[in-house]
Image (spheres, rainbow, N blue to C red):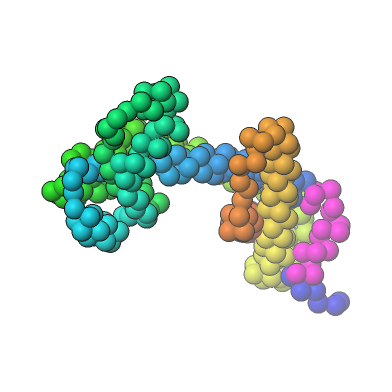
Amino acid sequence: MRYRTPFREAMLTFRRTPVLSGLSVASIGFSLFTIGLFALVALNFRKALDVLAERVEVVAFVMRGTPTEAISQATQDITAFPEVLELVYVTPEQALGRARRELVEFKEAYRDLEVNPLPASFEIRLKPDFRDAVHAQAVAERMRGFPFVEDVRYGQDWVERLDKIRTMAAAVGLVIGLAFAAVAIVIIGVTIRITVLQRAREIAIMRLVGATNNYIRGPFLIEGAVKGVLGGILAILMSWLTFEAFQRSTGEAGTTLVFFGPLQMSLMVIFGTTIGLGGSLLSVGRQLRNV
């Protein structure tokens, strides 16, 4: 009899039991699809929080009459702060012009002013990794150390609330994500177990003719891995179709949404492959012990 490699044997199984194999792939795909949908929601929620975090900035108001040399030296010092992404020095004239443009309700009052009441200021934008209350406060304290700085503000209450939302979202996301993953693992494991039981007679015959455990396991492991890969690809496809349908239904609001990148899609396929391999290994091992 011609020797068949484990890979060839696994592919023959797909041909002999196309319906069962298809159901296994679909089961893995739909299980990963639920995880994918949750991951998409979490990804876009995180992006929305990051957009809000871009508004975190420290504003230091400068005393009137501060020498230009002191301003220039301070600009160099502040730019060197490790937390600082961008520094903008706003003159009193620029501050007044901005107020006239943005504060429409006070437009007439600002127009009739004889003396500009608005001070100059340093507007400091922070790097993404430092947009939280702890680092914003640290930068604010350093700014208060300059003798010509009259006041420093960074929206402490708002930044602290944003930090709490991010922490809560991360904790809830982790718990729900693990729950979805556990359910997916159980469903996929049961599906693979059914596949192995359907071929219990074949396993028993192979043991009778002297086949080793590793030889028997080989085709099942390859079959489980292939089903995991196909299930992962199916999950990505369904997630993308759902994402596109949601974008179309929301119009312009959906254009800001993001889909998985190459890394996230690769991880989904790897996760499916790992579950397929693990489920096959456990199911075949249990069946071999019972033969």
Vertical comparison of 14 with 123: above or below: below
Nearer to me, 153 or 277: 153
Quarter containing the N terminus? bottom right
Residue 15 image-quadrant placement: bottom right
Q: Which residue is drawn at 29% across and 47% down?
A: 122
Whether residue 231 appears in this view of the structure is no
Is residue 199 among what the camera can see?
yes
Q: Which residue is painted at 60% across and 42% down in the image?
A: 256
In the picture shown, does residue 17 fall above or below 182? below
Q: Mainly helix, strand or loop, the magenta region? A: helix
What is the tally of numbered marks visible in this picture? 0
Q: Is residue 9 magenta?
A: yes
How far across and down, in percent of the image, does residue 185 sit? 59, 46
Specify whether 96 is left or right of 196.
left
Judging depth in this view, the residue of 228 and 123 nearest the camera is: 123
Residue nearer the viewer, 279 or 92: 92
113 magenta-colored: no
Q: Which residue is drawn at 28% across and 44% down?
A: 121
Percent of width and height locating residue 139? 24, 49
The magenta region covers 7-22
Q: Which quarter of the image is occupied by the C terminus?
A: bottom right
